[in-house]
Amino acid sequence: MNDSLTIAPGQVVDGFTVGEAVHAGGMGVLYRVSGPQAPFPMVMKVPRLGPGEPPETVVTYEVESTVLAALRSPHVPRFVAAGDLATGPYLVMEWIEGRSLKDWVARAPIRLEELQRLGGALCAAVHALHQQEVIHLDLKPSNVMVRDGGEAVLLDFGLAHHAHYPDLLAEEFRHPIGSAPYISPEQVLGVRTDPRSDVFSLGCILYQLATGELPFGHPTSPAGLRKRLYRDPVPPRALVPSLPEWLQEVLLKALEPSAAARHPSAAQLAFDLTHPDQVPVGPRGRRHRRVAGFRQLLRWIRAAGLEPSAARLPTAQVARAPIVMAAVATAHGNEAQFEALRRAVRRLLDAEPGMRLACVTAIKPTSELGGSSEEETATRQRIKHLVLLRHWAEPLGLPAGRISFHAIAASDPAGALLDYARANGVDQIVIGAPPPELPLKGIMQTVSVKVALGAPCSVTVVRPPAGR
């Protein structure tokens, strides 16, 4: 089995019956297989190890089999089995039903709504990966499948880095490893330990979906790869004028040469994609041409001495950029409760400078507001509560890029807050406690208790000091 092409349909390998070949790539061949080991469709990946094959093939096989076996996520194929490298290397995993992201790239630029949907799903998949200490480092459209339900699944972990395992690729090879159009500046410099490298690759994919072009073309030399350390891409709106400024702002931020200037996590990139009204547009979003002249020279000088930031675990980087939801009951106007919420949020801000704050209030839907005056319309009510949220948050002094405001009309406030937390990858919820004078039965029906019981994340329930 040292030559992947010798496997024939009908052959049985360690209990797996081999079917037809479904894909032949540079590193290996994929075969449909059947067997009793899994209740889902399976595929066998057999690396090319014959004469003349590149040495990376062996290492990427070892990396992929190790990483895939360690992952547990709906966003990656389920691991089934791996063969012995000495006698018969193979990797059996779940066969993912769906469409490759290449299908959307082929007809790019795609509609804005479709870009937001795909981008949000892809960012969610990458964020889930980082939460398990894995950085993909080879994100590109051919390595993404989209299930019929819209969920993104990441493929091909041969270049991945797992923080708890030796990095065989870093030990064996000193040149940049990855797909040239999507590789991050850190990877160009040989650094494989920053999860924000995946954020850069996400930016490349989203740019391609939005414009039909690659932000840095198809470089074929080390000098061509290094250009992304100082050369910004053509502004997306110069290619597709109909794109909104907020989207250009988001894309160019994800593609910043310095990892520290990008979105600190894939979750925060997803948040911007799905909440365009909360994206503050600056010079990046309004740019019509590339940076040139003296500014370009300064970038080149900085890039010549660029030193990547110190490595930290992917989960540590993600933890330093949490999305926190402050559930503010603007309809009640309890100033003591408001101040208690602010103090709790301030403590979190002091501990996590990269925190993103979402200020959320649930208000009665239009049908329950009643009245016929302009002040009682749904639009006016929403504006009123958004103003109240901004007033509540003003003492926190957060810049526009780190705070957002959301008034949700819902007859079930607790359900609306929980849905928001799940949909936006919220890491922690801060919410006011129920009044202490309520009987136990009444307390169990309060919004804060329902949220605490049903939340997909940590919940901090705060109460004003006694006597306030």
Image (tube, rainbow, N blue to C red):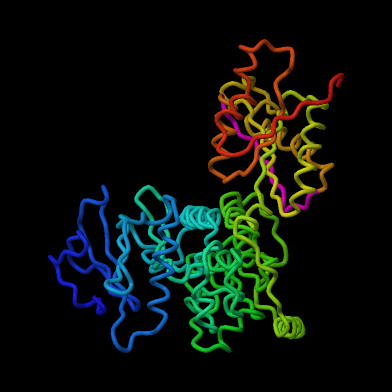
**Image quadrant in which you'd find residue 390:** top right
Residue drawn at x 20%, y 57% is 34
How many numbered dots are placed on residues in this image?
A: 0
| Image quadrant containing the C terminus | top right
Residue 237: x and y, percent? 59, 68
Between residues 159 and 450, which one lies in front from this camera angle?
Answer: 159
User: Left or right: where does residue 220 sit relative to residue 368?
Assistant: left
Residue 405's place in the image compared with 17, above or below, is: above
Q: Quadrant of the N terminus?
A: bottom left
Q: Residue furthest front?
A: 86
Q: Left or right: 382 with respect to 223?
A: right
User: Which residue is outermost to the right?
Assistant: 467
Above or below, 432 against 423 in this view is: above
Q: Is residue 380 left or right of residue 36?
A: right
Q: Residue at coordinates 57% horizontally, 54% vertically from top-left?
A: 270
Question: Residue at (25%, 76%) from the top-left corner?
Answer: 4
The image position of residue 112, as x and y in percent, is 50, 57
Horizontal relation, residue 226 to residue 85: left or right: right
Q: Which residues are magenta?
A: 398-411
Q: x and y percent of residue 314 in the render?
A: 60, 59
The residue at 25%/79% (across/down) is 3
Q: Please state the horizontal and vertical placement of residue 267, each as a whole percent of the image.
A: 58, 53
Could you say which quadrant of the image residue 103 lies in?
Answer: bottom left
**Residue 341: in magenta span:** no
Q: Nearer the viewer, residue 56 or 293?
A: 56
